[in-house]
Image: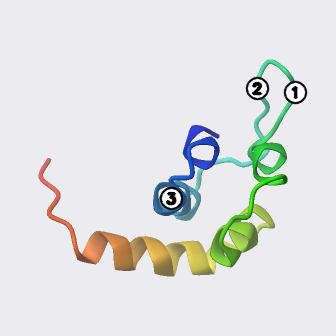
Amino acid sequence: MQAVRTAQWEAAATLISAGARTDLQNCKKRTVADFARPLSIPSYLQMGLDGDPSECQRVSSLALADCYLEM
């Protein structure tokens, strides 16, 4: 929810592609889709929220291809 609320589109795509649940509700009974509704979000993210994570996976892989991640 926070990634969408703060317009972190690639982060939201990565979370969706990793299997994050989009049906969870906060204490005010709002889902991530409720937060996204008034915003102009990218089409790949809308597809992910609608249940098709394929474009979120593509965007996530492109975003991660250009970064260095150390664990």
Left or right of 63 on screen, residue 57: right
Amino acid type of the residue that numbered disc 2 sits on in the rendered structure: Asn
Secondary structure at badge 3 equals: loop
Label 1, secondary structure: give it: loop
> Which residue position is annotated with label 1?
29
Image point (50%, 59%), residue name: 18
Closer to the N terminus: mark 3 or mark 1?
Answer: 3
Other residues around mark 1 within 10 Å, as few (<14) / some (14–19) / many (≥20): few
With 43 as the anchor, is 57 left or right in this view? Answer: left
Question: x, y (%) of residue 32?
Answer: 74, 45
Name which quarter of the figure residue 30 lies in: top right
Could you say which is closer to the camera, residue 2 or residue 54?
Answer: 2
Q: Which residue is mark 2?
A: 26
Looking at the rendered structure, which numbered label has been put on residue 18?
3
Mark sitting earlier along the chain (2/3): 3
- Which secondary structure lies at badge 2? loop
